[in-house]
Structure formats: C-alpha cells, structure tokens
Image (tube, grey):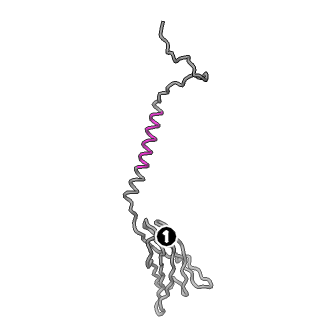
C-alpha cells in the first residue's frame, strides 16, 4: 500500500479544499524580469536627468515675419516670434524693434512678455509708422528677469 498525502481530499472548516501552492512558470518569471528591468531603467533615467540637467540659462531669440506685414489704422503691423532656446524660464522679457531708414530718425517699438518658459515660443506684433521692409530692422531682447 502506498502512502497518501493526508491533506489530499481534506477540506477546511467551510468545506473548501485548501489552496495548492502555485509554482511560477517560465513565462511569469520572464515577464517579471522584463517589467523590473523597464522600471529600473525609467527610475534610473529620471534620477540621472534630475542630477545632471541643471538647465541652460534663457537664450532669447527674436525673428520678424516680414512676409505678413499688414497695414491698419495704427500703422504697419509686423508679426514677430520670440523664442526661449534655453531650459529655464525668463520673466518680463523686454523686446526692442528698431527701424532705421536714411534721412529719417529711427523708429523704436518695444514690448514686454510676462513669462517665457524654457523651449517656449511666443508670437506678438510691433507697430511702425513706416513699412518695416523699407529700412534696416533690428530686433533684439533687451533683458529679462530670472523668476
């Protein structure tokens, strides 16, 4: 006669069979390993970027869109694009547009942008009394604050 497992066929006080211990399959171990590897890679990348990326200071560039100049009651409206190529935010960005033409005094337009986040682009317009395509146009950022 062979000996039988005493727990086999036994029931719990509620009449249920006791749960058998489940061994993990190769597929489960593989999935666990891949999931753990991905988790470690994501956490490691975030920590690496957090520790090494101190951020570049704001780099403000200004570009004119002279192809879209329009005239209205206020004068010649020139659309411009202001871009922060740095990583950090710039606050109270002051932009100056100066239009110079021979025989006429330079015309200066100025505007302020409240906030320009790192990598952000903002669009605005400056207004002149003369066509901005009829002279030398200089656009530049004059200054900003670090928030």
The secondary structure that most of the magenta stretch takes on is: helix
Q: Position of residue 96 (x, y in %)?
A: 47, 81
Q: Position of residue 130 (x, y in %)?
A: 54, 87
Magenta-drawn segment = 28-43
Residue 53 or residue 108, whichever sits in front: 53
In the displayed structure image, the side of residue 139 where residue 74 appears, left or right: right
Name, please, the residue furthest toward the front. Answer: 13
- Would you place residue 110 above or below residue 29 in this image? below
Residue 37, picture quadrant: top left
Residue 144 or residue 106, whichever sits in front: 144
In the displayed structure image, the side of residue 77 where residue 63 appears, left or right: left
Asked if residue 110 is among those painted magenta in the image, a careful observer would answer no
Q: Position of residue 38 (x, y in %)?
A: 44, 44
Residue 2 or residue 71, whichever sits in front: 2
Q: What is the secondary structure assignment of the residue under circle 1?
A: strand
In the displayed structure image, the side of residue 118 where residue 128 appears, left or right: right
Q: Residues within 10 Å of mark 1 (few under 14, many from 20)?
A: many
Q: Residue at x 53, y 17 (%)?
A: 8
Q: Which residue is mark 1?
A: 116
Q: Position of residue 45 (x, y in %)?
A: 41, 51
Name, please, the residue furthest toward the bottom. Answer: 103
Asked if residue 39 is among those painted magenta in the image, a careful observer would answer yes
Quadrant placement of the C terminus? bottom left
Q: Residue at x 38, y 54 (%)?
A: 48
């Amino acid at each position: 006669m062979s000996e039988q497992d005493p727990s086999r066929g036994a029931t719990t006080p509620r009449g249920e069979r006791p749960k058998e211990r489940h061994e993990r399959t190769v597929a489960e171990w593989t999935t666990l390993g891949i999931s753990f590897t991905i988790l470690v890679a994501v956490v490691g990348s975030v920590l690496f970027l957090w520790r090494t990326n101190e951020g570049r200071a704001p780099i403000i560039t200004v570009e004119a869109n002279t192809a879209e100049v329009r005239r209205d009651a206020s004068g010649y409206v020139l659309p411009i694009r202001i871009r922060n190529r740095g990583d950090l935010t710039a606050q109270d960005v002051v932009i100056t547009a100066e239009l110079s033409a021979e025989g006429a005094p330079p015309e200066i337009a100025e505007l302020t942008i409240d906030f320009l986040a790192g990598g952000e682009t903002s669009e605005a317009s400056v207004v002149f009394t003369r066509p901005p395509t009829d002279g030398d146009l200089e656009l530049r950022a004059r200054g900003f604050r670090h928030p």
